[in-house]
């Protein structure tokens, strides 16, 4: 397994947001996590990436216990993420947003690279930026200010920042949140492109049709607990998943 959560618990005072969740992410897969609002999905991502400390339990990455490691250390191991609320540098160009994502991978700072004429690293920086911009479909927007783009393109920039870090595991928190149905297919294509680069993906998403199309395996959470996991076909037939989240109407429409 690439990443394993073992009996993960997260308490906030007297509230248990995540309750003894066991979850594994296999190398090379696209794993989906679904569930109602407040079911613990984003909290689980925060625990996996060190943005929140676990109350109890263990998180293993490539067999190594990373429980309690800070987020920057976990990022260096090859785990990247996006956030439910898009986090990008609104006043910078699209290209500079991607370049900022590259900083952890550089031997020297961007400023040092440019001012001291470190030509080889400058060339690699430029090539990697171009590669990422092509993957997210924003190469022609390289010099645009990110804050001037629409929400869907800003979502792509956020994915690009994470992708620039050259992740092994990429966690996407509601990558299509806040965008219209017509734009979803573009983001699905981008996620597929990322997966085709050999990057393992775990995503939280409320658009069930997208999850069913993209994911080979789905985990359903409710009230901070994992209630079921399986293939899309198994999930759509599971009574617990139907009652907690999918609803009979969705299942009837998609039989």
Image (spheres, rainbow, N blue to C red):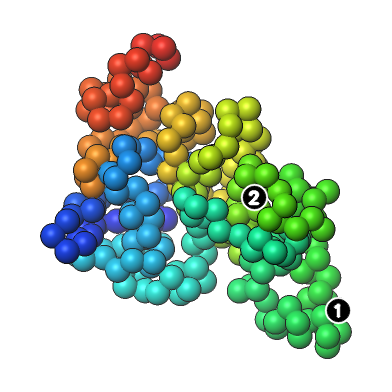
Q: Quadrant of the C terminus?
A: top left
Q: Earlier in the sequence, mark 1 or mark 2?
A: 1
The residue where tag 2 is placed is: 154
Secondary element at image label 2: helix
Q: Residue furthest left?
A: 14
Q: Is residue 108 left or right of residue 74?
A: right
The foreground one among 147 and 219 is 147
Q: Residue at x 50, y 31 (%)?
A: 210
Q: Residue at x 31, y 37 (%)?
A: 36
Q: Is residue 181 above or below residue 78?
A: above
Residue 65 visible in the current orientation = no
Choose top left, top right, bottom left or bottom right for residue 32: top left
Count every numbered label the image shows and give the total. Answer: 2
Q: Position of residue 119 (x, y in %)?
A: 86, 79
The residue where tag 1 is placed is: 119
Q: Position of residue 152 (x, y in %)?
A: 63, 42
Q: Residues within 10 Å of mark 2 (few under 14, many from 20)?
A: many
């Amino acid at each position: 397994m690439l990443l394993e959560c073992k009996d993960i618990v997260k308490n906030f005072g007297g509230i248990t947001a995540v309750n003894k969740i066991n979850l594994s992410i296999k190398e090379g897969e696209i794993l989906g996590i679904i569930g109602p609002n407040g079911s613990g999905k984003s909290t689980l991502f925060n625990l996996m990436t060190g943005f929140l400390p676990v109350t109890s339990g263990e998180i293993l990455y490539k067999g190594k216990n990373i429980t309690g490691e800070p987020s920057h250390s976990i990022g260096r191991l090859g785990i990247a993420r996006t956030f439910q609320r898009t986090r990008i540098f609104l006043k910078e160009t699209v290209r500079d947003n991607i370049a900022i994502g590259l900083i952890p991978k550089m031997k020297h700072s961007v400023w040092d690279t440019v001012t001291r004429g470190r030509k080889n690293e400058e060339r690699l920086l430029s090539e990697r930026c171009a590669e990422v911009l092509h993957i997210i479909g924003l190469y022609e927007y390289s010099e645009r200010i990110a804050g001037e783009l629409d929400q869907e393109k800003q979502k792509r920039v956020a994915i690009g920042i994470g992708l620039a870090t050259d992740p092994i595991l990429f966690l996407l928190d509601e990558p299509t949140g806040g965008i219209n149905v017509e734009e979803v297919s573009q983001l699905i294509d981008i996620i597929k492109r990322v997966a085709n680069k050999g990057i393992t993906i775990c995503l939280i998403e409320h658009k069930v049709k997208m999850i069913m199309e993209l994911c080979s395996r789905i985990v359903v959470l409710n009230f901070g607990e994992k209630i079921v996991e399986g293939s899309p076909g198994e999930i759509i037939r599971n009574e617990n998943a139907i009652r907690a989240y999918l609803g009979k109407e969705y299942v009837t429409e998609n039989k």
